[in-house]
Image (cartoon, rainbow, N blue to C red):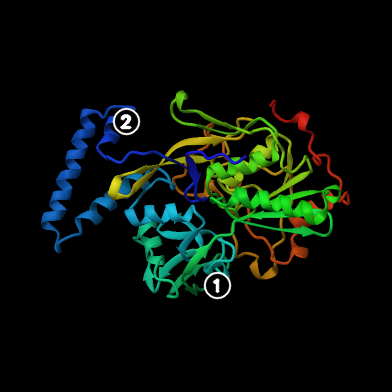
Amino acid sequence: MMRRFGLLMTGAAIGAVAVVGITDPGKLLALSANAASTETYRQLDLFGDVFERVRGDYVEAPDEKALIASAINGMLASLDPHSSYMPPDDFKDMQVQTRGEFGGLGIEVTMEGELIKVVTPIDDTPAFKAGVMAGDLITHLDGDEVAGLTLAEAVDRMRGPVNTDIVITVRREGVAEPIDITITRDIVRIQSVKWEKQGDDVGYIRISQFNERTYDGVEKALDELEAEIGEDNVKGYILDLRNNPGGLLDQAISVSDAFLERGEIVSTRGREDDETRRYGAAAGDDADGKPVIVLINGGSASASEIVAGALQDHRRATVIGTQSFGKGSVQTIIPLGSNGAIRLTTARYYTPAGRSIQARGIEPDVEVIQKLPEELQGKLEARGEASLRGHLVSEDGEEKEREGSYAYVPQDREQDEQLQYALELLRGIKVNKVFPPNPTEGIPN
């Protein structure tokens, strides 16, 4: 049964998010766990003095709302790459996006220095079809430099009326000259779950992100695959979470629950002990105990890491691929009435075994490195949270020496080494001691 939780995750660049109903910005001070010191108020007076000087003496009359927004965003951006201010339009767009339909290009982005870095193009969107690649650094929008823009400002520039074009200039590793890519804006409708049978014995389920329709899509996929293949003929399921940047946390929990009989799925822990939240599975395995293999890579982040970590810790699935992104922090969305909202990092999330994957990622049970085609060798970079400037460190201070892994998945299934390895395991062509996993070796339920 699908359950709704008041948390959401919106990608590698955004992370897990909790929505709280604060509509009066003045109440934020009253809710502060630590009262501001006298020195803090002196510094706020300094800010007021500077604002008045700029407002009164700058060579041209400034946009006062823009000044305030920039100041707030600068404060939040100084904390970590995932805290930010969302103007009203951006806040509205975020709410629309989680419903699985929005206008734009169809890319997940984050800041990389003064440039915009593509986390991943979303399947079957204008950016995906135009050839935008994970790891591309956007340097110009319609010929104007990105340097100097905030992430929110750059995203706003990339939005626009449907059927209008934008030219983005990208710098791609291994390519000497910048690349101009023309993209036609469109309504981006996200079908987050796609499925098909592999041969006559394996069900393949691809989740591109976690939106409000994801759990229903997984349920439909399991039902149709079982009916098409035949319950007695299903050797197992492949859950493909590669290049999945995240999405709604309640959907990640529900998808995990679809394959689990009981036990904890994920916990979130804030600065104070009483802020810990735990989410568990309800009875009932919708896959009827059939073997499950989860595929991950450097583009698997946030909500997808929750699913992979939960199924791995409970020994319900074997995880194959390469190290995931390592996006293990929770952001709280605090509405500010008509003034938009702020996104503030408030907690880390943990797998059922208590592992924090912030800046570390999920390690696969079987590492299968996808070979890059010759034309892409040297043009892609390993990706991970630890490579982001100003990232929140792992709680114990230890991080992976590697800063992530590649996020390349070939379109030709025959060339997909990770998928082929999974199929051979399910069919008994390959043998590995970690498959099928032994549930008794997992964490206690």
The structure residue drawn at horizontal position 32% and vertical position 53%, both measured from the top left corner, is 87
Q: Name the residue furthest left.
A: 56
Q: Is residue 8 left or right of residue 218?
A: left
Q: Name the residue furthest top.
A: 273
**x and y percentages locating residue 229 in the rendered image:** 81, 55
The structure residue drawn at horizontal position 77% and vertical position 29%, both measured from the top left corner, is 440
339 is higher (above) or lower (below) than 26: below
Q: Which residue is mark 1?
A: 130
Using the image as rendered, state which of residue 10 and residue 63 is in the foreground. 10
Q: CA distance from mark 1 to mark 2?
A: 46 Å
**x and y percentages locating residue 426 in the rendered image:** 83, 49
Q: Which is more N-terminal, label 2 or label 1?
A: 2
The structure residue drawn at horizontal position 64% and vertical position 54%, both measured from the top left corner, is 242
Mark 2: few, some, or many residues within 10 Å (few <14, many ≥20)? few
Q: Secondary structure at mark 1?
A: helix
Q: Secondary structure at mark 2?
A: loop
Mark 1: few, some, or many residues within 10 Å (few <14, many ≥20)? some
**x and y percentages locating residue 15 in the rendered image:** 49, 46
Q: Which residue is mark 2?
A: 32
43 is higher (above) or lower (below) than 232: above
393 is higher (above) or lower (below) than 121: above
Total numbered labels: 2
Q: Is residue 401 visible from the viewing direction of this image?
A: no
Q: Amino acid at mark 1?
A: Ala
Is disc 1 in contact with disc 2, using a CB cutoff of under 8 Å?
no
